[in-house]
Amino acid sequence: MRGQTELVALGVAFVVLTSATVAGVVFAHNALATAERDSLEQQTARALSDRLVSAQASHTARENVLVNGTLSTLDETTLRERYNIPDGADVRLVLGDETVVRTGPATDGTTVERLVLLESRTTEQLRPNFNNSRTTTLPRRTSTVRLTITPPAGTTVERVFANSRVVLSNASGLRGSFNVSISPFETATLRFDAVGVLDSGSVTIAYEPAETRKTTLQVVVDA
C-alpha cells in the first residue's frame, strides 16, 4: 500500500514538473518573440525616421527640412516598397499634433520623435521702375526667379546678370518669360543690360521665398 502511495505521488510530481517545464518553455518562447518584435519595431522606426528627413527624400527641401504639404502624399504602398516597411507592421506619421499618414491602428509600438523644419513658399512679384539704374535687389532669398521681359519698342535687352553671373544672354534681344536658377544662400541683385529705355513695365520678377518653422515629426511603428 505504501509503495502504491509513493508511486502515485511520484506520478503527480512528474506531471507537475512536466507542466512547469512546458509552461517555462512557452513563457521563454513568448518572451523571445516579444523581444524580437520590439527589436524589429525599433529598427524600422529609426530607419524610417532617418530616411524621411534625408536630403534625398522627394518631400524634403534639404536634410531635415520638410516641404509643407508633401509628407501626406505618402501612402501605404510607397511606405512598404520605398522604405521597406514589413507587411505586418502599421505606421503612423505625426507632424506637430496632426496625423498626416496612417497605414493601420498603430496605437502602440515604438515611437521616434525628432525636431524638423517645415518649409512653405509663396509667390511674390516685383516690378523694377528703373528710374536711377538698371539693377534691382530681391528683398528675400530664393533659388529660382521667373523673369518676364517685355521692353518697349526700340529697346533690346541683351543680358541679365544675377550678382556677377550672366544668367541670360541674347544679342538679338531677350523677350518673353524665363526661369532662372540663382543661389538661395545669398541676396540676389539682378542687372539688365539693354540698349534703349527700360521703364517700370519692362520687367516682372516672380519669385518664391521660403519660410520655415520648427515642428516635430513622430514616427510610430507597431509590429
Image (tube, grey):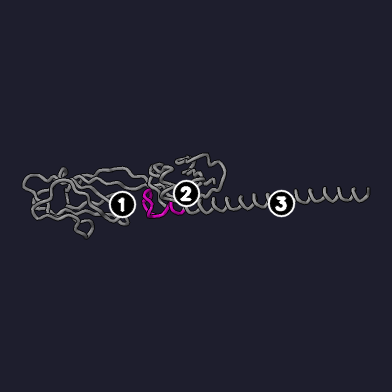
| Mark toward the start of the polypeptide (1 vs 2) | 2
Q: Nearer the viewer, residue 133 or 143?
A: 143
Determine contact: label 3, label 1, CB under 8 Å: no
**Which residue is situated farthest in the left direction here?**
154
Circle 1 residue = 141
Left or right, 27 with respect to 220, comes to right
Q: Nearer the viewer, residue 155 or 110?
A: 110
* Residue 193 in the image, given as x and y percentages of width and height: 14, 55
Q: Is residue 186 above or below residue 96?
A: below
Residue segment shown in magenta: 50-62
Measured Cα–Cα span from mark 3 to mark 1? 66 Å
Of the pair 81 and 220, the residue shown nearer to us: 81
Of marks 1 and 2, the one in the foreground = 2
The residue labelled by disc 2 is 85
Instruction: Give the foreground label among 3 and 1.
Output: 3
Q: Is residue 88 left or right of residue 5?
A: left
Q: Label 3 vs label 2: CA separation?
A: 33 Å
Q: Give the SS element for disc 1.
A: loop
Please give the name of the residue rendered at 19% of the width and 54% of the height, measured from the top-left corner: 191
Q: Which residue is mark 3?
A: 24
> x, y (%) of residue 118?
41, 47
Image spot of residue 15 (x, y percent):
78, 48
> Dot 3: what SS?
helix
Name the amino acid type tagged 1: Arg
User: Can you tell which mark lies on residue 221?
Assistant: none
Say whether marks 1 and 2 touch (CB < 8 Å). Answer: no
